[in-house]
Image (cartoon, coloured by chain):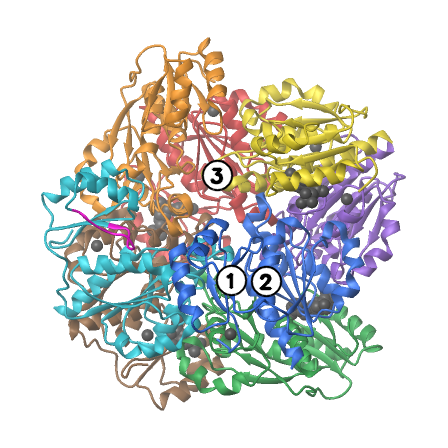
Chain colours: A cyan, B green, C blue, D purple, E yellow, F red, G brown, H orange
Amino acid sequence: RRKGFPEVIFGSGKTADQIVELFKRLMTQHKIILATRVSKDKAAAVRQSLPELSYDHTARILYYADKPLEPRTKGAIGILCAGTADLPVAEEAALTALAMGNRVKRFYDVGVAGIHRLFHHLEQIKQCRVLIVIAGMEGALPSVVGGLVHQPVIAVPTSVGYGAHFNGLAPLLTMLNSCSSGVTVVNIDNGFGAAYSASLINQLGEE
Amino acid sequence: RRKGFPEVIFGSGKTADQIVELFKRLMTQHKIILATRVSKDKAAAVRQSLPELSYDHTARILYYADKPLEPRTKGAIGILCAGTADLPVAEEAALTALAMGNRVKRFYDVGVAGIHRLFHHLEQIKQCRVLIVIAGMEGALPSVVGGLVHQPVIAVPTSVGYGAHFNGLAPLLTMLNSCSSGVTVVNIDNGFGAAYSASLINQLGEE
Amino acid sequence: RRKGFPEVIFGSGKTADQIVELFKRLMTQHKIILATRVSKDKAAAVRQSLPELSYDHTARILYYADKPLEPRTKGAIGILCAGTADLPVAEEAALTALAMGNRVKRFYDVGVAGIHRLFHHLEQIKQCRVLIVIAGMEGALPSVVGGLVHQPVIAVPTSVGYGAHFNGLAPLLTMLNSCSSGVTVVNIDNGFGAAYSASLINQLGEE
Amino acid sequence: RRKGFPEVIFGSGKTADQIVELFKRLMTQHKIILATRVSKDKAAAVRQSLPELSYDHTARILYYADKPLEPRTKGAIGILCAGTADLPVAEEAALTALAMGNRVKRFYDVGVAGIHRLFHHLEQIKQCRVLIVIAGMEGALPSVVGGLVHQPVIAVPTSVGYGAHFNGLAPLLTMLNSCSSGVTVVNIDNGFGAAYSASLINQLGEE
Amino acid sequence: RRKGFPEVIFGSGKTADQIVELFKRLMTQHKIILATRVSKDKAAAVRQSLPELSYDHTARILYYADKPLEPRTKGAIGILCAGTADLPVAEEAALTALAMGNRVKRFYDVGVAGIHRLFHHLEQIKQCRVLIVIAGMEGALPSVVGGLVHQPVIAVPTSVGYGAHFNGLAPLLTMLNSCSSGVTVVNIDNGFGAAYSASLINQLGEE
Amino acid sequence: RRKGFPEVIFGSGKTADQIVELFKRLMTQHKIILATRVSKDKAAAVRQSLPELSYDHTARILYYADKPLEPRTKGAIGILCAGTADLPVAEEAALTALAMGNRVKRFYDVGVAGIHRLFHHLEQIKQCRVLIVIAGMEGALPSVVGGLVHQPVIAVPTSVGYGAHFNGLAPLLTMLNSCSSGVTVVNIDNGFGAAYSASLINQLGEE
Amino acid sequence: RRKGFPEVIFGSGKTADQIVELFKRLMTQHKIILATRVSKDKAAAVRQSLPELSYDHTARILYYADKPLEPRTKGAIGILCAGTADLPVAEEAALTALAMGNRVKRFYDVGVAGIHRLFHHLEQIKQCRVLIVIAGMEGALPSVVGGLVHQPVIAVPTSVGYGAHFNGLAPLLTMLNSCSSGVTVVNIDNGFGAAYSASLINQLGEE
Amino acid sequence: RRKGFPEVIFGSGKTADQIVELFKRLMTQHKIILATRVSKDKAAAVRQSLPELSYDHTARILYYADKPLEPRTKGAIGILCAGTADLPVAEEAALTALAMGNRVKRFYDVGVAGIHRLFHHLEQIKQCRVLIVIAGMEGALPSVVGGLVHQPVIAVPTSVGYGAHFNGLAPLLTMLNSCSSGVTVVNIDNGFGAAYSASLINQLGEE
Ligand SMILES: Nc1ncnc2c1ncn2[C@@H]1O[C@H](COP(=O)(O)O)[C@@H](O)[C@H]1O
Ligand SMILES: Nc1ncnc2c1ncn2[C@@H]1O[C@H](COP(=O)(O)O)[C@@H](O)[C@H]1O
Ligand SMILES: Nc1ncnc2c1ncn2[C@@H]1O[C@H](COP(=O)(O)O)[C@@H](O)[C@H]1O
Ligand SMILES: Nc1ncnc2c1ncn2[C@@H]1O[C@H](COP(=O)(O)O)[C@@H](O)[C@H]1O
Ligand SMILES: [Mg+2]
Ligand SMILES: [Mg+2]
Ligand SMILES: [Mg+2]
Ligand SMILES: [Mg+2]
Ligand SMILES: [Mg+2]
Ligand SMILES: [Mg+2]
Ligand SMILES: [Mg+2]
Ligand SMILES: [Mg+2]
């Protein structure tokens, strides 16, 4: 892993004990360490042993940072979604992006069903260097955004929906078939992966 | 079938001979008869026997009408799609709607990738009584339209696309999961069915 | 959203606290507010803070109305299903329709396995202006009804079934492939969406 | 194979030469031999070598019989379908049933979209000993029939349809989830298999 | 429903109270009433109100019978499966068959992995009039049995398996594609439906 | 690639010219070169330029060998299938195995529907060191064979079937869920891959 | 569309006449115009009317450029794939990238089955600013590359494969589930879309 | 089952009582008995009755052995995976292999994302006689390993992943489509089956 990058633990399916042990081992060598997909209870258990860790409830990320997280980039990563249901994924992306040193701008009320709000924020959105566009239900937002902007768009389908949604399959297919150019896609609910790629892209504009 | 309704033959998988025979039988009793999904060649073969039939190349509909088709309704059915690829489905809907006596308004360049054109036509679109919104690729258009208007929207996914489109499955799922209210869905490429339902709805406003 | 329309909260995946806050914000501006997909326990928790809300156990809808809900339309929305298993979806539709001002007629014992009951009610069913037809298992009811009536039919597949039912996929496909014309489809278990579209259609007949 | 049973060749994917050879070998020992799924052209090629074979165009069956096929049973197998599109499957079933010695009654215009025709024939249908019910599109017919009769019903989904039909998957799932009891299912388009099982059942009533 | 047939309640998704009420209503008119898919706890709750009901733990059937269940047929329904995992489905079939008056013969250790046991019982199996063959995992048993016997075989896939089993999809497809003739299929885990059809068939041999 | 191994070209989707060029390049360094999935016409075109190549019609393999192919192993690879439809896959396996120096024994009439033939050959089958078991339709053969023998079994599903076969998905799932131990699986129609692995295994017994 | 960007026509499903007309209209205003997915024959037909167009056989792109295409960027887009089967997709990406002004470096023999070639080119690969990694079959290459480099990786699954490949579904899922960070995905065979996004990213490094 | 082979119980879906009874019956005749898929709690319950059984927490195997398990083979089975998430499957394989008398070598940190560790162990891996390669997420490891070694590779997809992983479907398809030769596949999470086949293969090298 590149120097200066945070170290990341995939918390899902690991016990609190295993996570404690991983943090202990990594804390000797790394300045920022994230554990994603950590439930509230598991986080509390880990923090009994390691009270220096911070926990973000919405992002479900437990993390260690040797000093407060601060953006180092001029360019910003814009994160767009329609509302509360997608917040966990959006904040997983936001905190990951911040931990990688990026400025982050949040646009969390720009769903397709109320498209005027998207237009309301459009100028600000266009000033970001790269966009992460998150959507559950039918997942149409990245297509709409991609048609309006010239930035690279990373689309994240979420598992928010029911019935013929098939736990995120519907918006995943929507995004893969986007008729707007400039849209690439990551796995369902993968806010972390979107932020990681967005960070690599944002850094290119800094150099 | 209700008096005054056109009689409809599903042409796919029937031979020219079978279609000739069906028309002959039905022409003794009906004033308008449509055969949908009839290829150019099959239509030509049928018209050798029945030169009084008309054929619409784009809609792939072969039809008999005892007098020229004319709209009888005040209210209009609006038909929206993004462009040439969806024309066969859009025109199948348009001709079916006309054959059922409806005024039809076409908006055929309003795709999600160039959303300003949709806004350009919005006032006219809002004056229709019911909308048929057709889309292939990711199928996001009905969600966008549904969020902007108060008319009933009938969404038609098309088989236009490739790869993870799975011959229309992608836009079908998109439309079923629409986050805009007021959207109902018909089968992939089913312009006929959309127009049939739209006509029933449009008639309600005439009474 | 059109003036006079109820405001609607999708309750699934929101905490009681989030729902309380949303109601509080919306109650300053709206006369009718529905929260769908609210469990009994969550409803009780919300009503601790907001005792003026009503809760319908079967429909799983928590709602605010500044005065008792009453139908304002002459035309009725008919709601058809086969029996107790589909009641939650049917009542979600019924209460949504009522909240939007529609007269509602219920036909809740008209399954395909005992088709004589459907014929028994047929005249009454035909007097409705638009029909919502709900079915789990194989989902054949909308096809049968669609073949017998001339009203627009909105078909709702439900997740009631097992094995090769795949949580509603089976009746969803059935309804999308209906050989009866005049049938459009909404997402699995989406009683709300069916009622919303049915209401738009029913209003057309009022004007 | 039981004595007196016809021998059967699955013709699909075999060359005319291979079919000729198989018939020649079997004709030394069997009185009735069927080859199913044989196209018109392939049948003609085979009959160049073996002019004593008969070919049924609709059923796509090429067969040898040492004397004219005649029913030997008192009880009849009823075969039901909605119309011309399903005829190849229906006739594959009918000819197989006849070749196994069964009386066959055809009811070929009893689709769900025009359910009165089903009721029109119902008394005759009830006099059959076992029923084969064939349907494409949404495949609702076996559920409707199963709810009206007390005979064993063998349901055959067909590949007739488009879009979300997925080449027969839709009616297959419909039939497997039938809410009427007494319905069992065979593979898509498997008229032969339905007739084979129906014949075994019909024979039980003869003994 | 035919006179003398048991009345059947689908217990899954019904509350104990609803089941009590249904039994009470039906017990005034019917001599045998089955409720399938009733868990141990739900059965106990129902029997608090209705102690005259019997409960079969393995079959998960709660039932009322005015006198002890006894076979009335000469011919037997053979029920075959590989072992303990499939017992609930096998016994749902067995008790349903008995309640419909059929003699039942159980062959519960005849899996494909130890095929000699199938051969060991083959003569007895061949003396049954109709066979229900139940299998999870890869579901190969009905094909093997169908190739060895001349009775109608009703195949029941079960949800026993993991991974690429997809909760019964694997054996369902296996059975639908059986290369042995005389095999028809019911829904995954549908022991009830298999027995219902088998009973209709077995009765034919009695007449 | 290990010394002495044949070089292999995947012929599907390559033009005759591309295949000629590949052979020419490889023939300077390799003693045996196979091109799999080469149609009859394409093979003829290649052999115009390279008449020293041999072509096996059934296996659809075009190959170069500096001297006649001969088995070098004591142990044999047994190849089992049900009949003519699976021959192309079986022979692709057989020729690949031979080209890799293995003795091959063919058992090509041992389908599940006529299981006595399998027992007839069982002793010979048990003398092979490793078995390739090929099946289309429901794909039950590897489970049956695996339950009878102690050799490693490599199962190959084929695309032979229709309807709910889904081009080989049905037997693929069957084989992955085999209740017999000692069975591993390769891709649909992948006779080449099965033979390659079988050869690696057979060689272990030679050393 | 951003000034200086090429205009793009999706050629699939359009007739030669329609493509001619589109080019004519666009050539009055644009300096570079691409039509993707144009077959050899269709290209020839278009060039009868418009001989000034160029056609790239491998990329299947027909294009107009007012002067020879030349890279304008310092940074390069690296395009990686395993071999000839994926060339059409790779060259669709390469030509699109060039048309958008990017330097392109090709690495076309770096499949997972011969991983040493990937290592051989690794230093050169690492000097590119962004990578497009194309793979059919199991689609493992982007994961391997992503684990070795720090550039953004855009993964393109291709439809090259058979059986359980399901026309590209297999590598699509592989890429969406990549355990390497920094990988985003586009639709199956979408070389155009990958290049479009890669170009947006590459430009960021120029500024 | 071959003499000397352990007897195996599939523990999933069996009660502690049923497992006790099965062990008791088998312990009179067998020297080694494994019960796979036994949870910690169920194991504890069984061991109350049968304290002589051992339980491996990671492998979730409860077993009886008349003397300590020891490898008897010269050749080793190598077991490869990427890390902790796949340990249960890896250890199910390892303990099964040991119980069948095989030497086992573990390589548990060789994931595709950090491919240098795979190269680090490559010489040792190549000294094993047969390899079991386990992977969740995208499942690319068996392709990479298969391209580097000449041993038979048995690939095991695991259910470790999320979103478009579909509980193991993604790596299962990856492995079936492997572009490296010499790879065969078992069911998702089937460590037992992989070890069983690997043991059969490893024994061949002993003889
Ligand atoms: N393109 C179409 N898509 C769906 N349904 C159709 C189409 N065209 C006709 N139909 C329906 O098919 C019926 C006629 O079917 P048939 O009797 O097979 O010709 C009509 O009554 C219509 O309801
Ligand atoms: N286990 C079962 N699987 C499938 N259908 C069943 C089952 N048990 C009962 N049924 C059917 O369900 C009907 C009763 O459904 P309900 O009125 O919902 O209780 C009965 O007439 C049976 O046809
Ligand atoms: N029929 C086949 N199925 C699967 N893989 C094959 C087949 N034939 C050849 N291969 C593999 O494809 C590789 C050659 O691919 P290519 O370089 O595209 O010709 C060989 O090394 C084999 O491993
Ligand atoms: N091969 C391709 N795959 C995906 N999208 C494409 C492709 N080629 C062109 N497009 C997109 O299709 C649009 C043009 O579509 P159309 O107006 O139908 O020709 C372009 O603006 C591109 O964004
Ligand atoms: Mg854009
Ligand atoms: Mg709206
Ligand atoms: Mg109707
Ligand atoms: Mg019945
Ligand atoms: Mg049989
Ligand atoms: Mg074995
Ligand atoms: Mg990387
Ligand atoms: Mg290898």
Q: Nearer the viewer, residue C21 or F71?
A: C21
Q: Which mark is residue C95?
A: 2
Residue at 56%, 32% in the rendered image: E41
Secondary element under disc 1, as helix, strand or loop, is: strand
Secondary element under disc 2, as helix, strand or loop, is: helix
What is the distance, in whole Å, between disc 1 and disc 3 at their CAs? 58 Å
Quadrant of the rendered structure where residue D167 is?
bottom right
| Residue receiving disc 3 | F156
Q: Does the magenta portion include G202?
A: no
In the image, is the residue at mark 2 within 8 Å of ligand 6 by its beta carbon?
no
What is the distance, in whole Å, between disc 1 and disc 2 at their CAs? 10 Å
Q: Which part of the image, by quadrant, shows the N terminus of chain G?
A: bottom left
Mark 3 — on which chain does it sit? F
Q: Does the magenta portion include A54?
A: yes
Do the residues marked 1 and 3 share a common chain? Answer: no
What is the distance, in whole Å, between disc 3 and disc 2 at their CAs? 55 Å
Q: Residue H81 location, x and y as percent?
A: 28, 37
